[in-house]
Amino acid sequence: MTTAVELIQKKRDGGELVAREIEWLLSGYTGGSVTDYQMAAMAMAVFHNGLGPAELAAWTTAMLHSGEVLDLSHISGPIVDKHSTGGVGDKVSIPLTPMVTACGVWVPMISGRGLGHTGGTLDKLESIPGLRTQLSTQEFKDVLEKCGLVMGGQSETLVPADRKLYALRDATGTVESIPLISSSIMSKKLAEDLDGLVLDVKYGVGAFMTDQQLARQLAQTMVGIGADHGVKTVALLTQMNTPLGFEVGNASEIKESIDVLKGGGPADLVELTLAIGAEMLMIAGVAPDEQSARARLEWTRSSGRALEVFATVIGAQGGDPGVLDDPSRLPSAGQTHEITADRSGFVSVCDAYKVGVAAMRLGAGRERKEDTIDPGVGITLLAKPGMEVSKGEPLARLRYRHAARLEESLRVLDGAWRIADERVPTEPLIAERIGA
């Protein structure tokens, strides 16, 4: 008879678990016969010794089938999703998915919440008055069938092993494990019954995976898992040393996303949205190449079609579509404070990590899962790398409610901007493309 202790010892000593052992372990953990402390020991063993290709495949499959798997076989069109590993100011999913849906692709997006210095799509969406992201499986399917798009959270019955294990990893110092990260992400995405998936794998000071080489390894691992399960998967490696866009917050990032859907928006945010969207359209088979894909996506903005899709989804999930015409309906903190340049020159650094932590200290993010989000606070960036500034010119505007939180945020932001005498070349936004 297999026991958890035997499997822990086997993995601890560098052995390879077989599929039936992994299935037994994760099934027992989901059901409660394998304890948290036993799984914590296993997670640490995996953290130190990794998982071989066969182990990783079995681990992901066992996670995937630990609960409900969506059956979307009745949908006749292509079903494609995207996933970002998380970054500061990364609101790409919000304008991207209505644009892709407007091109004829079905998008069943299961998103997450922010933790630490990176924001979460669900928190941003919930700044829209009335909008619900916690949907039952049937509600999730109903919204998808009505709108072609749904943006919700992970349900209680979908990949429950991942929900338990994710919380455990966060509390036991085993988050930064490529096998555990990749199986966590891919088990949830594979449960969506997808035809294709595009991954935005971020690296840099503002990403969880700071090293580009490790980010590449994570991307390659997830692309391989997708291919093994018959899901066309592409990954873009994108830098997160500088925040994406000009807004870091929840309601303010919704406003910036609306600007993109109306044909405007910051150049870096628009470029990444179009790049990921083009990959999604090509995987779906609705565009033959990147040029035609980008043209179709731009049409959804200029014609207003993407905005119409977003309005329909907001309404279907209980929200107020009126925010699209009147963004002042979104929450906004009443007090502001500006940070100014201490010298003239060219911005060479705008530290994404410091900006993300500062926004969290204002109340835009959470240090612990149980923390409450304030959707109206945040940071508007007024100067990013490559921009020229004069002494005394504002670099950022902070929206806050409590003076004590403002002071904490300002301490974090000390040294977040660096100004050089000459313009420094900016880093490319997209470093690599990985996959078929």
Image: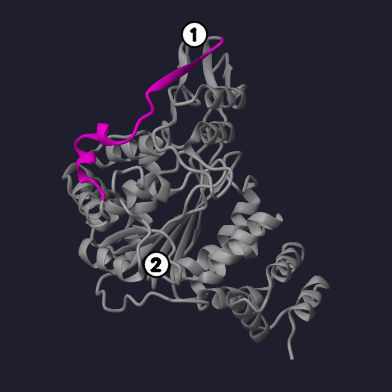
- Helix, strand or loop for disc 1: loop
Q: Position of residue 169 (x, y in %)?
A: 65, 59
Which residue ends up furthest to the left in the rendered image?
303
The residue shown at (46%, 11%) is: 393
- Foreground disc of the pair 2, 1: 1
Task: Count the labels in the image.
Answer: 2
Q: How is the image coloured?
A: one colour
Image side of residue 97 versus residue 201, left or right:
left
**Quadrant in the picture for residue 80:** bottom left
Residue type, label 1 = Gly
The x, y position of residue 314, in whole percent, is 25, 51
Q: Horizontal and vertical percent for residue 24?
A: 64, 83
Judging by the rendered image, the residue that carries numbered circle 1 is 392
Q: Note whether 168 is above or below 9 in the view shown.
A: above
SS label for mark 2: strand
Q: 269 above or below 347?
A: below
> What residue span does the magenta drawing correspond to?
319-342
| In this rendering, position of residue 379 left or right of residue 321 | right
Who is closer to the viewer here, 209 or 239? 209
Contact, mark 2 vs mark 1 (Cβ under 8 Å): no
Name the residue at 56% across, 27% down. 409
Q: From mark 2 to mark 1, how far is it between C-alphas?
A: 49 Å
Q: In the image shown, does 263 or 185 lie closer to the viewer? A: 185
Find disc 2 in the rendering and name its residue.
196
Q: Is residue 243 visible?
A: no
In the picture, the disc for residue 263 is none
Q: Position of residue 79 (x, y in %)?
A: 33, 68
In the image, residue 320 lies in the stretch drawn in magenta? yes
* Residue 278 position (above or below residue 388): below
Q: Is residue 140 magenta?
A: no
Image point 22% across, 53% down: which residue? 315
